[in-house]
Image (spheres, rainbow, N blue to C red):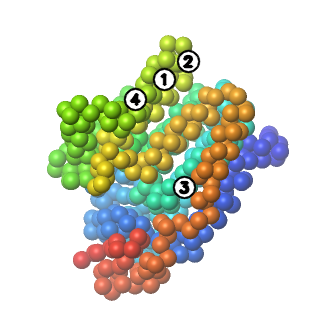
Amino acid sequence: MKSPNNFIKKNLSLFILFPLFLKKSFLFFIDPRIWAEEGSIYFTSAVKYGALSIFKLQQGYFSIIPNFTLYLASLVDYKFVPLFTFAISFIFWILPFWLINNINSDELKDDDLTKFLMGISLFVLLNNYQEIFLNTINLQFITPIILFIVLLYDFKKLSLIKQILFYILIIICLTNGVLSFPLVPFLIYKMISEKKYEIALAFSIAFIIPILSIFDNATSNSSSISNRFLLNLNYKIEVFKKHDLIDLLNNNYYWILLFISLRFLYLKKYALSYFLAAALALFVFVDFAKLLHPDDISVIPARYKALLFSFLTIIFFVFVKRPILKYLTALVLVIVFGRNFFKHDFSHNQNAKKWSQEYKNLYQKKSAEIHPVGWKIKLK
């Protein structure tokens, strides 16, 4: 039986972060809101199609969390719809930090300092990008982080019940948007290396369906992943044709991760090489899957950067061995990103109509205004 002191020590970051998280999300407690596509696409689809909406592709790809959450929300009084999206988002935002505290690999199991500093750093980093905060739509940027942390676990040391729960969590991550896709080869490799061949085969087969779906022209539109890939590829080809290699390298700086990964592979630092390669795969995928910025096609939007920086932060704290470097890095991240923590979160726009009034319009007029200003639910 674990002593209370050991439990507190192991979960110290959660004891610190949880009240801070409640402080930041206070407005969402007293005035829950529906965010953008949660209402205009997913809730509308749930009302129109019922249970079938759970399996629908929206915007060219499949997202299980908003599909399922908004379907459940459509079954209750519309007044309580934002409570569903808030509760699910809150759980998935807390989950990465709980997972970090419970990593069971030989290298990190008893390294409470590393897990504490990693959790604090990741927390201030993610909370600096307000658009992704507490809505089911942008959980697609949180679930890849969850999956990346899961790759740090030693599945052989987990009980059968925990393994099953982890497999369910992995499936949720893989089916919530497309940003976890680059991690699938690394996930399959991990299962094979731990001699879980049936699980590796199951993930391989299951992964074929979402991959095919995003390239299905019947479900694609101008913002679908398949079209984004083509537009980004065409842009890079045009830059290459102009022989503007400097510009091409500037906008594809992440390829340095390939050389670093190969260098560590040569040095037989296989685990570090493995995770750097996983980070590179995500960088490449994000660069080709990003929505094109109207002013600068090469720009990676802030919410994608939050995901990419999170991967590098996790890798740093896992593989850097000197405590002083970890302390200094965590301090810098807290100073740089933490200063915006207590500022008002624009993702809860106080100028937007309050749902406590708007839900009545949804019954009466089949239309309601949601966050951010200008977005609406239209059930007509």
Q: Are marks 1 and 2 in contact (CB under 8 Å)?
A: no
> Does residue 217 show up?
yes
Which of labels 2 and 3 is toward the front? Answer: 3
The percent coordinates of residue 243 (x first, y second) are 23, 30
Q: Are marks 1 and 3 in contact (CB under 8 Å)?
A: no
In the picture, the disc for residue 21 is none
| 375 left or right, relative to 173 | left
Q: Earlier in the sequence, mark 1 or mark 4?
A: 4
> Does residue 175 show up?
no
| 190 left or right, relative to 379 | right
The percent coordinates of residue 310 (x first, y second) are 52, 42
In the picture, the disc for residue 269 is 2
Q: Element type at marker 1?
A: helix
In this view, the residue in front, 229 or 6, is 229
**Mark 4: few, some, or many residues within 10 Å (few <14, many ≥20)?**
some
Q: Earlier in the sequence, mark 1 or mark 3?
A: 3
Which residue shows up at 71% across the image and 54% down it? 16
Q: Earlier in the sequence, mark 2 or mark 3?
A: 3
Image quarter where the N terminus lies is top right
Q: Earlier in the sequence, mark 4 or mark 2?
A: 4
Q: Amino acid at mark 3?
A: Asn
**Mark 1: few, some, or many residues within 10 Å (few <14, many ≥20)?**
some
In this view, the residue in front, 367 or 278, is 278
Q: Amino acid at mark 1?
A: Ile
Q: Circle 4 sits on which residue? A: 255
**Mark 3: few, some, or many residues within 10 Å (few <14, many ≥20)?**
many
Q: Earlier in the sequence, mark 1 or mark 2?
A: 1
Q: Circle 1 sits on which residue? A: 260
Q: Circle 3 sits on which residue? A: 128
**Mark 2: few, some, or many residues within 10 Å (few <14, many ≥20)?**
few
